[in-house]
Amino acid sequence: MISSIHIYIGRVHSHLPQSFWDDVGSDLHQKYECDLVIMPVDEENTRLNVEGDLTPDEMMAVKDSFGSHMQKTH
């Protein structure tokens, strides 16, 4: 079970509008019914951290969901 998803927004994606991150957060929160934290960091890359007692399939599902949103930025 997923307890929380943390998205750390690196400088590469810091130009994206807040509305984009609001949409990502809303989608992930609804799909996985967990806490969600989105915060900018002073790092180059954006990274995702998923916490909880996860199966490999659950982890891949979250990464795929996040990845589908990130593909829209390119």
Image (spheres, grey):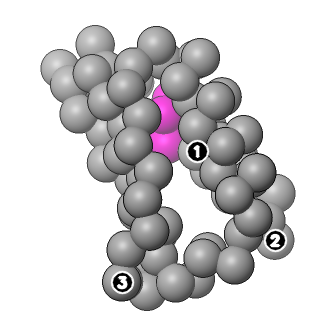
In the image, residue 53 above or below residue 23: above
- Which of the 4 image quarters holds residue 54? top left
Q: Classify 10 Å Cα crowding around label 1: few (below 14), some (14-19), many (20 and above).
A: some
In the rendered structure, are the residues bearing label 3 and label 2 in contact, judged by CB atoms less than 8 Å apart? Answer: no
In the image, residue 37 above or below residue 48: above
Label drawn at residue 21: none
Residue 33: tell me if it is visible.
yes
In the image, residue 16 above or below residue 61: below
Say what secondary structure mark 1 lies in.
Answer: helix
Expressed as whole percent of the image width and height from the top left, the position of residue 13 reads 61, 74
Q: Nearer the viewer, residue 16 or 53?
A: 16
- Which of the 4 image quarters holds residue 51? top left
**Is 8 contained in the magenta span?**
no
Q: Which residue is drawn at the image coordinates 59% and 17% (left, top)?
A: 30
Give the distance between the C-alpha atoms of the residues marked 3 and 2, in whole angstroms.
Answer: 22 Å
Q: Which residue is mark 3?
A: 42
- Label the magenta part by its dominant secondary structure: helix
- Which of the 4 image quarters holds residue 56? top left
Say what secondary structure mark 3 lies in.
Answer: loop
Q: Earlier in the sequence, mark 3 or mark 2?
A: 3
Label drawn at residue 66: 1
Expressed as whole percent of the image width and height from the top left, the position of residue 46 reads 47, 69
Give the residue type at disc 1. Answer: Phe
Residue 60: tell me if it is visible.
no
Q: Which residue is drawn at the image coordinates 31% and 38% (left, top)?
A: 50
Magenta residue span: 59-63
Q: Which residue is mark 2?
A: 74
